[in-house]
Structures are given as structure tokens and as C-alpha cells.
Image (cartoon, rainbow, N blue to C red):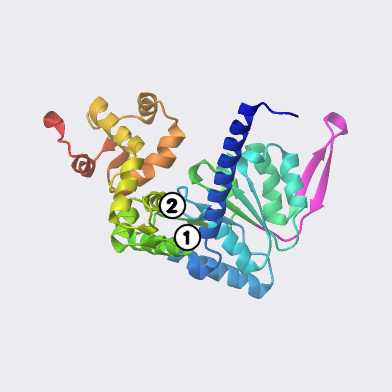
Amino acid sequence: MILPFGAFGFFASNMKKINQNKDDQNIDLTLRPAVWDEYVGQEKIKNNLKVILEAAKKRNEAADHLLFSGPAGLGKTTLAYLVAHELGGLIKTTSGPAIEKAGDLAAVLTNLNPGEILFIDEAHRINPIIEEVLYPAMESRKLHLVVGKGPGARTLSLDLPPFTLIAATTRENLLSQPLRSRFGATLRLNFYCIDDIKKILNRSARILDVTISPEAVDILACASRGTPRIANRLLKRARDFAEVRGTKTVNEEAARKTLEMLEIDELGLEPQDRRLLMTIIEKFNGGPVGINTLTAALSEERGVIEDIYEPYLMTLGFIQRSTSGRIVLPPAYKHLKIKRGEELL
């Protein structure tokens, strides 16, 4: 096929974007801890996992099924890979939306080898019908399949090898109780403290071969929303800014300019966060306002508000969920530098 001259530029531009995306993915994989000693934070979860895994190895058995829950970017997938590494087995990954029918799940389960890990991300999006197939697989390592339809239908039962299912979810409340009860341990990841985020930033800077000043670390850590994924993203953008300026050093100025360009304030609030707070304050006098009314006012999906915006705002003490709706709290007014009630600016 012969391309017109102008098409070569379009093709080259798109190939460049694809290569850049691959480079970002490769960097993310490089920054991901490969051993326990490199994983910073979540000490209680790490200690619980070490006990579970050590006991399983001593009994020469597959470890109990594990459920990791918590906001996105806190390291659920990383923990799954560390568990697989600790057990010396391979890990096969899929996600709830990717398992569209029972046959998809059956194909995954029947291809597992003894001792392997099956990691299912976004487990709350698994179809309830498919969950019925998963129950006996988790409980008794049996796979029950219905072959045919109508009066001629019959059930096949297949034995599965010993395996460990690790599921990750940002919405534990959406998991059915029968599924939750089949996990040997449910471990909830919390936002990281500032000191742990600083350690992560310094480690990532060493891997990226970037010199970063203590002042820049402080600024980026405070704006990282207690989330390693966001911390690494901000570090990469600050590195880009520094390189454009002709230096590999991320200093205080580079950190502040990076946040300014991304419209992120010193506490990590993004435009969408501030818009949510201001909508409640200006349109609903600070609340309470019901979630459905709020989603309509913001033109946002309910899941986005509940999963992405609210968890961090609640951690900061800026917003409160009540039976009558969402309420903006005094610390948010102070941060936004506006007055309450009749003196609202």
C-alpha cells in the first residue's frame, strides 16, 4: 500500500505517541517494587501477608484466597505480584469486565497450574452469574459447567489444581456477601502518610536517575494525595519540566511550576475536587446535598464522585457523608479561603 505524503506525518506522529505510552508503561513497571523490602508503607498488611504466606509454605499448600480493597493507586496490584513472588509461582491476571461469560472464567481456571496465582482486578464488576461459577472453584476447587440447553442439558464437574485467587477492588461494598465470605483474608489499603510518600519519591528518583532536592520532595509528597501512583506521576512531570529547562535536578521551583501547570494545589486538590467543593458551597449552601442531586449538578457519574473525589476529601476532613447528604466542613472553607454563611465570598 502506498501512502500519500501527508499520511506519513500522521503515521509517524501516532507511532511516536504509541512509543511514548509504551515508555511510560515501562517506567511504571520499573518503579513497581519487586521484593518486600522495596515496598514502602502498609506495614500491618505486609505483616499479615507474611504470616499467611509463611504458614502456607510450611504446610506446602496454596495460600488462602485474598481480597485487597482500597482507592486506586495504593498498590493492590503490586501486592498481588509480591505474593506471587513470595510463593514462587506464576501469576495470571484478568479483570472483572474482561470476564463476560462463564466460558471466559472456565478458560482461565482450567489453564491454571498447581500453585499459580489468579489475580482479578476490579472484582466488583464481575457479573453475579459468573460469581456462581467462582464459588465452588474457590471453596472446593471444582468447576461446574452446564453443557447444552433445555431437557438435554447436563452438568460437567472438573477438578482444578490448588491455586490462590487474589481479587482487587475499589468498591468493596459492591461485592456480594457470598463472594466476600470465601476469601481467607480481606485487607484494606489506606492512604499513605507523608513520610512514606517521601521515601517512595526518593526511591523513584534514584531509579529514574533524577536528582531531587529535599524541598521538592516535600512539595510533591504533600500534593500526592497519599497515593504512590500520583507521587510517581508528579515526579515524572517534574523531571520533564527540569529537562526542558536543561537540568536533571528537580528543585523547589521545578516542583512548584509542575503543580501550577497541572492546576494542583499544595494539598493535591485538582480542579475537579475544588469544583465539587464549590458546587456544594455555592449551590447548596455547604450542604447537606444528596448524591444524586450532586451528580446532576456536576454532570459526573456517581461512581467517579464516590471512588475518586470523596475518599481523599474525607481524609482531609473537607467533606462528610451523612444520612441526609454531603456536607462541606470548616477546614475546606479555610483551605479555599472563603467565608461561611452570610459572609460567603
Residue shown at 22% from the left, 39% from the top: 336
Quadrant in which the C terminus appears:
top left
Q: Nearer the viewer, residue 141 or 284?
A: 284
Q: Which residue is mark 1?
A: 208
Amino acid type at mark 2? Lys
> What x and y, as percent, mark residue 227?
41, 52
Residue shown at 45% from the left, 52% from the top: 229
User: Residues at badges 2 and 1 in contact (C-beta under 8 Å)?
Assistant: yes
Which image quarter: residue 195? Answer: bottom left
Amino acid type at mark 1? Leu
Q: Residues within 10 Å of mark 2 (few under 14, many from 20)?
A: many
> What x and y, as percent, mark residue 286?
23, 32
Q: Residue furthest bottom?
A: 58
Query: The residue tagged with tag 1: helix, strand or loop?
Result: loop
> What x and y, as percent, mark residue 282?
23, 27
Which residues lie in the magenta part? 143-164
Q: Nearer the viewer, residue 233 or 33?
A: 233
Query: The residue tagged with tag 2: helix, strand or loop?
Result: helix
How many marks the image carries: the answer is: 2
- Residue 161 lies in magenta, yes or no? yes
Q: Residues within 10 Å of mark 1 (few under 14, many from 20)?
A: some
**Residue 288 visible, this angle:** no
Q: Is residue 187 left or right of residue 104?
A: left
Chain-order first, disc 2 or disc 1: 1
Q: Which residue is mark 2?
A: 236
Which image quarter: residue 276? Answer: top left
Does 207 appear above or below 14?
Answer: below
Q: Is residue 89 left or right of residue 341?
A: right
**Residue 36 visible, this angle:** yes
Which image quarter: residue 192? Answer: bottom left
